[in-house]
Image (cartoon, rainbow, N blue to C red):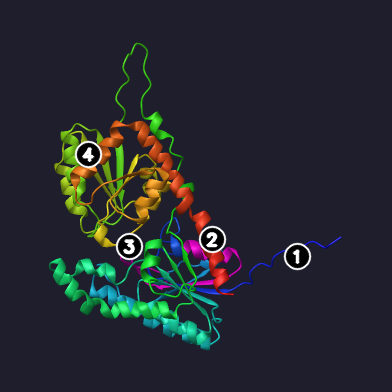
Amino acid sequence: MPSPAPEPLAPRPHSVWLVNPFDDIPGEGLPPLRYWTLARVLAARGHDVIWWTATWSHRRKAIRSAPLGIRDDEGFAVRLVAVRPYEKDASLARLGSHRDFGKTFERLANESISSGQLERPDIILASLPPLDSPEAAARLAKKLDATFVLDVQDLWPETFDRLIPGPSFLKRLIAPFLLGGMQKRRESLIAAADAVSATTRTYADAVLRGASAELPRHVCYVGAYPQEFPSPSRIMNRVPALDAGETTPPEPAPLECVYAGTLEAGQDLDVLAGAAKQLSAAGVKATIHVAGTGAFEQSLRRSAASLGGSCRLEVHGLLPRQAYVNLLSRCDVGLVCVKPESLVVVPNKACDFAAAGLALVNSLPGELQAHIDEHGAGVAYTAGDAGSLARAITGFASDRTRLAACQQGARRLAAAEFDRERTYPKFADWLETVSE
């Protein structure tokens, strides 16, 4: 009788360095985002994981320190790299901070290995953006004979096109001179990479255009945790039952909509107050919640205070995580209000909204809308057109059966594409294979 086939060997433990200055680290908030999630998954598999990040919090715009006991609590280490602060995302100070991070990270890494404090990494995965730190990671990987993985999170430098002043024809003439150097640096990074991961298929296709088909690649959305939110059964319960003697059902409760995220240029924020005015004029009962902070928070608060009628605009500011989860859990519709020219493809808010089972109203054509259409998770509106947004909201307010169907579709979308408990183990599987 033939002996049974041997069990496949588990991947040997690796030393993995993650290089990303942006994501929240342990102690700064929950849930874990991309790098915290990936670090947890890799550490749970027995890999020795170090996450190199910056002393300046990109989200909070504040100095940070790593809490004691991260290795014991999380299974991985966090090493902070000193950088200069910056207040504006689009600024020379931010680019200077990125240079600090790349230069100091490379120096600290070399010193730590030469002194014996750290072992040589088997894998270095570095995020793009910024440019300086993955360039340093590529040099270190070559020197240390490590696998270099480039993780594409945004389209740099294309995202800067919208910041160039002047008409479109002038931008097309100026852009190669202003951004051509950054484009060449990205091309050099692709050439140096042993593998490339990305947060969307659109980003992967854009940066890998012309790259060898044999270059390993993987797409893992930033994603969300559907487990944080209750299943979307609330919509049928929002129509009150008939009392004894009543012959017509009372009107359903006002539709609760939410926009969440940064309140900065690139987001389609002007349409919120305009849509609220049109909804009130039509007698549509709705509330548009705004959760987040940024340069446009005060103007939105002024608009909210000036509005009257059946549709309210309520600005909450930046909410703690549990309050944010509670807000999404009691809403019906998630507003993905982003300008297409921002080149954002699948924003974090869309993942959260789908995970919470909110019907999506989306301004971004392409990859996200294709997922929404495939799963019946919502509808599109035209960015910059308050009337288009108002019509989308009116459609859900007047047809609660359709709303319920789209909410269920959103949960299907989250389960299929955005559930971090499914997608990040697959990301880790891929990393283990490219390093062999």
Q: What residue type is labelled 2?
A: Lys
Q: Distance between the residues labelled 1 and 3?
A: 51 Å
Q: Which of 373 and 200 is in front in this view?
A: 373
Under tag 2, what secondary structure? Answer: helix
How many angstroms separate mark 2 from mark 3 (CA)?
Answer: 30 Å
Q: Judge left or right: residue 218 versus residue 341.
A: right
The quadrant of the rendering that contains the N terminus is bottom right
N-terminal of the two: label 4 or label 3?
Answer: 3
Q: Name the residue under label 4.
A: 312
Question: 10 Å neighbourhood of mark 4: few (<14), some, or many (≥20)?
Answer: many
Residue occupied by mark 2: 426
Q: Give the range drawn in magenta.
A: 36-65
Q: Is residue 70 left or right of residue 332?
A: right
The amino acid beneath tag 3 is Arg
Badge 4 amino acid:
Arg
Q: What element carries label 4?
A: strand
Indicate the position of residue 244 as horizontal and vertical percent values: 37, 12
Residue underneath mark 3: 60
Q: Is residue 118 above or below residue 340?
A: below
In the foreground, 285 or 313: 285
Work out how far the residue at label 4 is from the one at label 3, CA to CA, in angstroms.
Answer: 28 Å
Q: In which quarter of the image is the C terminus?
A: bottom right
Determine if residue 409 is in view.
yes
Q: Is residue 112 left or right of residue 406?
A: right
Of callouts 1 and 3, which one flags the residue occurring earlier in the amino acid sequence?
1
User: Is mark 2 in CB contact (under 8 Å) with mark 3?
Assistant: no
CB of mark 1 within 8 Å of CB of mark 2?
A: no
